[in-house]
Image (cartoon, helix red, strand yellow):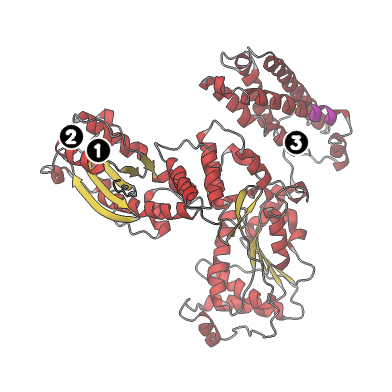
Amino acid sequence: MGKQAATTSPVYAIVDLETTGTNWKNQARIIQIGCVLVQDNQIIHQFETKVNPGVAIPSAVQQLTGIHQRDLQSAPTFDELAPSICAMLTDTTFVAHNVNFDFSFLNMELVKAGYPELTIPAIDTVTLSQILMPTAPSFRLRDLTSYLGIEHDNPHSASSDAEATAILLMDLMRRLHELPTLTLTKLAELNLKLPEQTAVMFARELAMREAAPVNLDNAHYVSNGIVLHKIRPRTVEHPHRKFPYPRTKKQKATFFGDKYQYRPVQAKLMNSIYNQFRQPDGSQQLVIEAGTGTGKTLGYLVPLSYLAYPHGQIIISTVTNVLQKQLAQVVNEQLGELLPFQLQAVIVKGNQHYIHLGKYVRSLSMNEDGANVQLLKARLLVWLTQTTTGDLDELNLNSMRSPYFATIQHHGLHTVTPDEPFYRDDFLIRRQQALQTANIVITNHAYLVEHAAELTNDQQASYLVVDEAQHLSHSVMRHSRLTIEFAKLSTALNQLKNLVSQRDEHNLRAVFAKLPLGSYNIELLQTDLGAVEQALEEFQTALLNLLPASQATTGYVEAMVPVAAIAEILDFTQPLMIGLEQALASVQLHFNALQRLFDGRRDSWLSLDRYQMNQLVVTLPFWPKLMMSYID
């Protein structure tokens, strides 16, 4: 018998192109090719060449790439390079940062030169990065390399970009290899629709695990079918040693050492705070205005840390979640580096910022049509192996939150019961436990206004710092008022009615026309929406009737209304609220029936049918909740 051929590891060809434009059909051409071959997590070959495109290079491209027309006069044409490119890429896996552009552009150039398109697998490092590095601040190549500390001195140079992408790929491969096997299995079950063959990377790694199983490491544990990151128990120190506060200039210079520069204004700020609260009447308030560059954050944190340690608590409130994050960095990195003792810090923000594990796991079993939603689920799966807070803001998606997040966000401790599968893992419960031992609590004005009593510990002396205090009054006003925007509610209701009505050629009535049970539920849903509309009108009329007759018909009106009168209207034992609540519940009931019918026949729908149903899925489940949040 002959010897069995040794299995060779795949070769990845990381390619980056610089072109005269983004559209090949508009005569855009390649002007530079960079390629790096990687095998067994090592660079084995590098190739770079400029390409004479035979067309003029736009000035914007010259500025971006640094490649000018004169640089390409003696360069080979793509036709001349095509044979060696095909030979180099044969039997490799094509890799690019935005593979849909580079792979298709290169293939079109090959066809133009008389060669067949490449049929090798291709993967995308953008979507791989989004999944495997869910908390990265950005997924542009230059931002990722900065985030990872990868040397990338010449962005928009094909050779530099290809090399940086190759190092990024090796980092991603390491992260992929470190993923728990159960998480990999869940990723494969999502049937991700990623560019080209990118999703194969997860299947390939999973196949390797089946051949050589990998045990779960000590940093993770499994709960109800998903892998979560362990949280180290918080240790509460009860030291006998006293730590003297650095009062003098010499003591402060020693305290800061060579890490931070001594600033006289900051030193004065520190002493003012320390002396204020060391006095017998230290309960008095202190207002300080500190200019930019004075180091105010450490200026108040250092003295308060000495005052609070070991059993006291510092509560810091600032204006935004972004500033909360910055404060946490100062506490964990700078303050922790300076203090001779250890303090425990916890960030506290609104419930909706945290993931509800039960809702998220239930969503994994729902086959979404939208590729973007599936991608978000994948990112969350990996993120759950990393996060210890469950704070969705760690994903850096504030500016582009998907409606999907409304289905998995938390709604407070009162919604969690001990019989729920993830009760022990719930992030809000963990946060509440952390509050009991935390020395520093970092919150925002909005949360402070509504939950001040929850932040204090009766057994600890507390110091409250209102950072950016000029914004506190606005937060008080904003969160002490309940606003009902009937125009916005009416617009949302009309959108729902149009989806099920016959006003448009494409509507859900037509989608379910051949299903008797579907048509029946569409009729009921349309009736329900009409009932909601009528109940809203009655609700609005009841509120307007509380205004003096002379004001009710004018434009903008601001008037004091007795709380008892409002409470009477919002009483859920009265016909007005009963009717509205029943109409909303009926809408939800018949929507659920339609969704079950649709999901049961997933393979029989046209893409337009899917789009129509998706519009309802996105809009309807949250609208009744929105309405009830106004009146609850």
Q: Please report contact status of discs 2 and 1: CB closer than 8 Å, yes or no.
A: yes
* Number of the label disc, if any, that sits on residue 304: none
377 to 350, vertically: above or below: above
The kind of secondary structure the magenta stretch mainly shows is helix
Within 10 Å of disc 2 (Cα), the crowding (few <14, some 14-19, many 20+) is few
- Residue found 34% across the figure and 47% down from its top: 10
Is 140 inside the magenta-drawn segment? no
- Residue found 43% across the figure and 57% down from its top: 147
In x, y percent, where is residue 25? 27, 28
* Number of the label disc, if any, that sits on residue 628: 3
Q: Earlier in the sequence, mark 2 or mark 1?
A: 1
SS for callout 1: loop
Out of 156 and 230, give the one closest to the viewer: 230
In x, y percent, where is residue 263? 50, 77
Classify residue 335 as left or right of residue 595.
Answer: left
Out of 273 and 450, give the one closest to the viewer: 450
Amino acid at the residue labelled 2 = Val
**CA separation in Å, label 3 and label 1:** 54 Å
* Number of the label disc, if any, that sits on residue 55: 2
Q: Which residues are magenta?
A: 577-582
Number of dots carrying numbers: 3
In x, y percent, where is residue 214? 51, 55
* Number of the label disc, if any, that sits on residue 20: 1
- Residue found 66% across the figure and 22% down from its top: 597
Is 579 inside the magenta-drawn segment? yes
